[in-house]
Amino acid sequence: MTLSQADYRDRMTEALRTSRADFTDIRLELIETTDVRYRGGRLEAATTGRDCGGIVRCLAGGRWGTASFNSLEDLPARVDEAYACAQSVPSGDVALAPVEPVVDVVPAPIVRDFRQVNLSAKKALAKGYSDLILAQPSVTDARTSFSDRFCACYYASSEGSFIYQEHPYAVLGLSATARDGSEVQSAGDGIACGLDVGLAEGREDVALEVAGRAHALLAAPPVKGGVYTVILGPRMAGLFVHEAFGHLSESDFLADSPKAQEMMTLGRRFGREFLNITDGGAAAPGLRGNMKYDDEGVRCGDTDLVREGVLVGRLHSRETAGRMGERPTGNARATFYRYPPIVRMTNTRILPGPHHLEDMLADIKLGVYAKYSGGGQTFMENFAFASGGSYMIRDGQVAELVRDVNFGGNLFTTLANIDAVADDFTWGASGGSCGKGQEMWLPVGMGAPHVRVREVLIGGR
């Protein structure tokens, strides 16, 4: 039986009326997925799926209880279960920051819907890129994929909120492995196309760049380890601000760590006056991290984190905002209906600065231009990243390609050493995702201009 939005609202509202908790909310997700993957020219997966489920949260006496479900028929029973779970917790001090109830319907502004493209066409799309990559010099393996997920999400709370939102996510993934004897190098890229599947078509340029970069890395010399002035390309700078800074701004981490609170004290100067960092669910159309409301029904605004070099804000759920006496920022997000929302970034960016890339390069005698992002990891204020493709800078000019570029350091030292931020801001188009405490990856956006950092330790040979 197909239910209307009004039917879902009636059933969720009726279940909320049965709750004995101080606060109760229900999040319901109807999900459609497709996953097509090729490796080495061979089809590895071609699947479609549908799922339906949700989660109930009850807050009773400062204690949370949750219960997940896959059928609306037993929703009142799941409300009772969530309340019983809360009652079983020995003690708690959770207090939610107040928000105004919201009733809204938020359809996705889709240009061309990936759900209208059949599985055969998606297979042909991924295979075409696979064949093209495999035909390039030195390439011995290719991995291509087209994965999409459409989530129709309903949210209702005992405070009177009812929100329907649509979240379409789709990504074209491309990677190449090149070999020359025992030497092996890889390169990859992706294209996010959740609102317009047409963005994944006709992208032979990206496939050729990936294959060409893998081939070129075979002959590229390893970077010589040392301390350099580094220019981070927009992709690398976007990854840096997300991983090294953004996670420290998530207040569920801060609330339980006195050391982190000391490091992230509001009013602390982190950098120069041209360093500005924000996070927001509606920063620009079509971004992976976009949402009008978070998974607690809180409006997603644009949150200033660093303004003119000074820490001025943090990312909050209602719980962390209540605990720290601040306002919710619309950053409570969950990867899947089985999980309660936790504090997560949406679209994080370094804002454009007053400098020009040519001038930033001009006075570098010997440096590194980290253009392509690779993997990264952080621990508290320390970080380590790898670049998926970098170039030496010699006498103010971008010179030869080098590989094995790894750099790390202390976040606060690195922020203080940013001495130029360019005016050429771009959002990453590769389909960024973030993992934190839940088994699935969460779509996020990352953006930055070119950023110059002095005294960066580069690991190499």
Image (cartoon, rainbow, N blue to C red):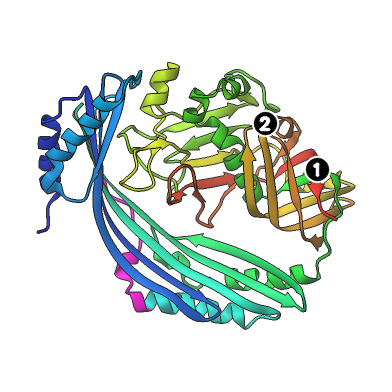
Question: Spatial distance from mark 1 to mark 2, Cα to Cα?
Answer: 23 Å
Image height of 201 relative to 30, above or below: below
Q: Amino acid at mark 1?
A: Leu
Q: Is residue 104 visible?
A: no
Dot 1 and dot 2 residues touching (CB under 8 Å): no
Identify the mark at residue 457; answer none if there is no mark: 1
Q: Nearer the viewer, residue 256 or 282?
A: 256
Identify the residue at image location x=52%, y=26%: 254
Q: Is residue 142 visible?
A: yes
Q: Earlier in the sequence, mark 1 or mark 2?
A: 2
Image height of 326 relative to 278, above or below: above
Identify the mark at residue 59; answer none if there is no mark: none
Image height of 177 relative to 131, above or below: above
Q: Quadrant of residue 268?
A: top right
Identify the residue at image location x=28%, y=31%: 65
- Magenta residues, start to end: 105-120
Residue 331 belongs to the span the image colors magenta: no
Q: Quadrant of residue 349?
A: top right
Q: Amino acid at mark 2?
A: Phe
Q: Nearer the viewer, residue 55 or 234?
A: 55
Q: Position of residue 350 (x, y in %)?
A: 60, 39
Pointer 2 residue: 274
Identify the residue at image location x=71%, y=68%: 185
